Image (tube, rainbow, N blue to C red):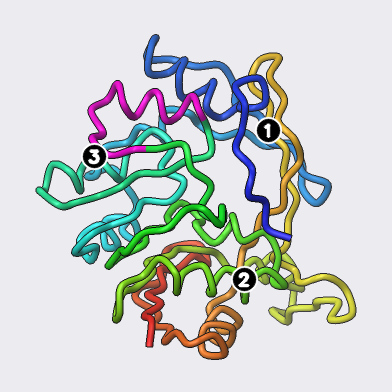
């Protein structure tokens, strides 16, 4: 089931980190927990990086975005702002109230605290941007048909989704190069995460990393054409999903 809720400030660790960095040019550790991985952290400074410092996949996506653009999970607005500066029409959305406030203060002209999957959210976009492992908010493979149904509601005829993700199969690679995955278990790219910033701890959430072959299969089944635009340096890739 895809969540349609918004965050409140007391459950918004990433937003709190973004707000701190914006105000003070520094932030504490944004900690990330998972039942599948060791504790990690997100470098908050990277959420504010300029276009020239972004990975090639993200810069490629920004150059391909055209028409009326929706930036999903826009965070600090790091993708929205260069698009806006290039004269493109872009609407930034995020479920974080603190991130939305920061984007407004940074000069993002069209921004709203919105959940992509809220049935009340509608529009007509030529490009939907889902970057920084943008497939994540889909949560689980079983949610993909619902995701594509929502995309059809939001996209203009011939519109496209520009989405990046990663293939986590490398985590299951043996010394001889073979990959051993339990096919009877859950899809290997389904991960649970929880974040904490200072004393603000968010709820646990599902996050989907999806290999391109699987994404392409679901896209075709749901009326989209999948194109592998570019591969990154570490099992990541940028996909273009065009509404047929």
Q: Using the image as rendered, state which of residue 205 and residue 70 is in the foreground.
A: 70
The Cα atoms of the two marked residues, 2 and 1, are separated by: 26 Å
Residue 48: horizontal and vertical position, in percent?
35, 32
Look at the picture and state if 30 lies above or below 23.
below
Q: Residue at x 84, y 81 (%)?
A: 183
Residue identifier under label 2: 146
Q: Residue at x 34, y 73 (%)?
A: 160
Report which quarter residue 149 is drawn in.
Answer: bottom right
Question: Which structural element holds mark 2?
Answer: helix
Is 86 situated left or right of 161 in this image?
left
Query: Mostly what secondary structure, the magenta segment?
Result: helix
Residue identifier under label 3: 81
Among the two numbered marks 2 and 3 on one chain, the one whose residue lies closer to the N terminus: 3
Outermost residue, top direction?
24
Question: Which structural element holds mark 3?
Answer: helix
Q: Using the image as rendered, state which of residue 173 and residue 102 is in the foreground.
A: 102
Q: Quadrant of the N terminus?
A: bottom right
Residue 132: horizontal and vertical position, in percent?
46, 51
Residue identifier under label 1: 195
Q: Residue at x 62, y 26 (%)?
A: 8
Look at the picture and state if 118 lies above or below 211.
above
Outermost residue, left direction?
87
Magenta stretch bounds: 97-111
Q: Residue at x 45, y 63 (%)?
A: 164
Label 3 Cα crowd, 10 Å radius (few <14 / some 14-19 / many 20+)? many
Q: Are marks 2 and 1 in contact (CB under 8 Å)?
A: no
């Amino acid at each position: 089931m895809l969540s349609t809720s918004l965050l409140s400030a007391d459950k918004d660790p990433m937003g709190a980190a973004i707000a701190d960095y914006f105000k003070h040019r520094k932030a504490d550790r944004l900690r990330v927990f998972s039942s599948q991985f060791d504790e990690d952290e997100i470098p908050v400074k990277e959420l504010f990086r300029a276009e020239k410092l972004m990975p090639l996949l993200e810069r490629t996506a920004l150059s391909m975005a055209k028409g009326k653009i929706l930036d999903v999970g826009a965070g600090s607005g790091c993708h929205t702002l260069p698009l806006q500066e290039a004269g493109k029409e872009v609407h930034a959305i995020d479920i974080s109230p603190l991130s939305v406030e920061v984007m407004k203060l940074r000069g993002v002209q069209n921004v709203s605290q919105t959940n992509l999957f809220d049935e009340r959210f509608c529009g007509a976009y030529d490009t939907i941007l889902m970057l920084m492992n943008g497939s994540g908010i889909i949560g689980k493979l079983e949610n993909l048909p619902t995701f594509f149904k929502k995309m059809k509601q939001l996209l203009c005829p011939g519109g496209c989704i520009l989405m990046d993700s990663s293939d986590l199969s490398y985590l299951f690679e043996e010394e001889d190069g073979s990959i051993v995955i339990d096919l009877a278990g859950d899809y290997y790219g389904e991960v649970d995460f929880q974040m904490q910033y200072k004393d603000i701890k968010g709820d646990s959430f599902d996050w989907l990393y999806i290999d391109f072959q699987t994404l392409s299969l679901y896209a075709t089944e749901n009326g989209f054409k999948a194109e592998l635009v570019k591969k990154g340096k570490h099992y990541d890739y940028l996909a273009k999903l065009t509404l047929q």
